[in-house]
Image: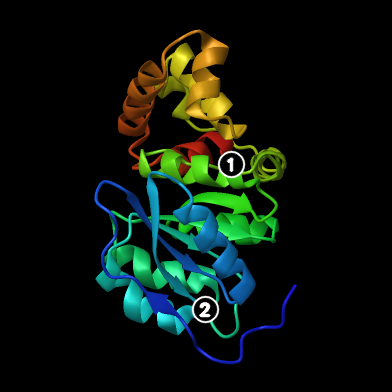
Amino acid sequence: MCDLLKEEVYYIVIMNKKNKISVAIVDDKKDIRENLEILLNSSANIDCIGTFPNYHSAVNNIPDLEPDVVLMDINMPGKSGIDCIKNLKPKMLQTQFIMLTMYDDSEMVFEALTNGAAGYLLKRTTPHELLDSIVEVYNGGSPMSMEIARMVVDSFKQELRKNKIKEKLTKREWEILGHLSKGMRYKEIAEQLYISVETVRSHLRKIYEKLQVRSATEAVLKYLQK
């Protein structure tokens, strides 16, 4: 692991290639930013349009870039990645934020998700899984590392409380939400239930309407709090 950057150096590529998912990276480690940039630009449908080493460079420049997705580290000098999301998300409702971090602390996970993160991945996530997760979140998904999904479930098991959420959902919708809470991808859920991916998406749209939530993340959090 390299030393923290002592200077605020970042770059911006104003134009991204047409029809590609535009992604910005926020991480204080220069080598991580560079490696992620190389990985993203190696994909046929993803384009890295900017990298930033800290809170201030991110909040001052990312809104102008309007990326589709932001990969956000948590632990940075000064203000954290969670502070960054708190600042940016209200201004960038169409942008999806994925936490990409070494930290699997439950409080950090929940704070990130409740402040607008649409996904939470550990940095040991494989390159293939990371690229898939960017496409997934762009298409309305909510990717989480399996370790994170299990931790979230285990944490809420300690504080189960009664409510009327279950009464609002059909058996099939409940099955899909349960699989989603385990970190399964839409394709995996479809294969498990012998239905199409589009049918999974259709059920999720109905779930969002019934639970009055805007994303898979919010739906999973409500499911886990049942």
Left or right for 63, reference 114: left
Left or right for 45, reference 30: left
Q: Residue furthest top?
A: 194
Q: Residues within 10 Å of mark 1 (few under 14, many from 20)?
A: few
Q: Residue at coordinates 46% horizontally, 47% vertically from top-left?
A: 43
Looking at the picture, how far across and down is residue 21, in whole percent? 34, 49
Looking at the picture, how far across and down is residue 17, in whole percent? 28, 55
Q: Is residue 208 above or below residue 214?
A: above
Looking at the picture, how far across and down is residue 163, in whole percent? 50, 33
Q: Residue furthest bottom?
A: 7
Residue closest to the eye, 106 or 18: 18
Q: Residues within 10 Å of mark 2 (few under 14, many from 20)?
A: many
Closest to the camera, between mark 2 and mark 1, is 1
Identify the residue under disc 1.
128
Identify the residue under disc 2.
53
Is any atom of residue 226 visible in this view? no
Q: Residue at coordinates 61% horizontally, 47% vertically from top-left?
A: 127
Left or right for 6, reference 1: left
Q: Amino acid at mark 2?
A: Pro
Q: Is residue 25 above or below residue 163?
A: below
| Placement of the C terminus among the 4 image quadrants | top right
Q: Amino acid at mark 1?
A: His
Mark 1 secondary-structure assignment: helix
Looking at the picture, how far across and down is residue 131, in whole percent? 51, 45
Q: Is residue 30 above or below residue 106?
A: below
Is any atom of residue 212 visible in this view? yes
Quadrant assignment, res 90: bottom left
Q: Residue at coordinates 69% horizontally, 61% vertically from top-left?
A: 103
Mark 2 secondary-structure assignment: loop
**Mark 2–mark 1 contact, CB under 8 Å?**
no
Q: Residue furthest right?
A: 1
